[in-house]
Every structure is written in C-alpha cells, then in structure tokens.
Amino acid sequence: MATISAPEARLLAVQPYDPTQIKAVEKAIMESDLGLMPSNDGKLIRLPIPSLTEERRKELVKLVKRYAEDGRVAIRNVRRDVMRHLEELVRNGDVGDDEERRAEAQVQKLTDDHVKRIDELLKHKEAEIMEV
C-alpha cells in the first residue's frame, strides 16, 4: 500500500509503505498510459499533474473511449461464450430449442442493456472531462 497526498493542487506525492517497492510503483505509473512522468528521491514519488488544456482533455477523452470499447468487447466476449455454452447444451440434449431461443434473447437483451449503460457512462464522462 502507499500513502497518497496532494500537498499542492498540481503535484501528487506517493510514498510506498515498503520503500524497496518504489521502483516497481514508479514503473507501474509510467506504464499506465496516463501521461504522468514520476520522479523519485528514493522515498517519495512525485507526480506533476499537467493542467487540463484543451489538448490534454482530448487525450483523456480518447483514453476514456478506449476503456469504454474494452468494456464493450468484454461484454460481447461473455455473450459469445454463453451462446456457445447454450449450443453445447442443445447438442447434449439438456435444453430444448425453445429454451435456447429464449435464453439467447435474454442474453442479447442483457448485452444490449450493458453496452447501452457503457455508452451512457462514456457520454457523461466525456462531457465532464470537456467541461471547463
């Protein structure tokens, strides 16, 4: 765990409980693709937080869109796995065709509902990020 404090509005300080892990924490921050460049003094990691310029806001929106697309893909992958499982149940004779169609319709409805929820959250977050 780490102690996180923000002594200034534009500087975030992270102090790991285990000082031997400072390099790992710093590496994870750099690989996070958040555009933050950490610096450390051996005990404390300092993260200068860039001011939100128009360009930076657009970068953050792109990042949020990528996360939303990853969520949509994950939902579709679950749907695909469930559909395969249903087909297998029909092949084995455990489920009838009518039950399969009802289950597929229900899975599709759940998929659509969750994708719609991601889209709504994305729209809200985009507006929030672009708000000055």
Image: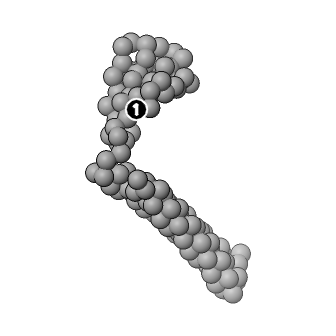
* Residue 22 appears in the rendering: yes
Classify residue 52 by image quadrant.
top left
Nearer to the camera, 65 or 93? 65
Which residue is drawn at the image coordinates 53% and 67% (left, top)?
120
Nearer to the camera, 105 or 12? 12
Nearer to the camera, 110 or 64? 64
Residue 39 to residue 131: above or below: above
The quarter of the picture where the N terminus appears is top right
Which residue is drawn at the image coordinates 62% and 81% (left, top)?
105
37 relative to 65 in the view: left or right: left
In the displayed orientation, state which residue is furthest to the left.
Answer: 55
* Residue 72 appears in the rendering: no
53 relative to 102 in the view: left or right: left
Percent coordinates x, y for residue 122 in the rendering: 48, 62
Label 1 sits on a secondary structure element that is loop
Residue 99 to residue 63: above or below: below
Number of numbered discs: 1
Q: How has the structure been colored for display?
A: one colour
Percent coordinates x, y for residue 15 in the rendering: 49, 19
Classify residue 33 by image quadrant.
top left
Classify residue 92 by image quadrant.
bottom right
| Residue that label 1 marks | 10
In the displayed orientation, state which residue is furthest to the front.
Answer: 132
Q: Residues within 10 Å of mark 1 (few under 14, many from 20)?
A: few
48 relative to 118 in the view: left or right: left
Percent coordinates x, y for residue 47 in the rendering: 38, 28
Which residue is drawn at the image coordinates 50% and 20% (left, top)?
16
Percent coordinates x, y for residue 58 in the rendering: 32, 55
Label 1 sits on what residue type? Arg
Which residue is drawn at the image coordinates 56% and 74% (left, top)?
112
Residue 99 to residue 89: above or below: below
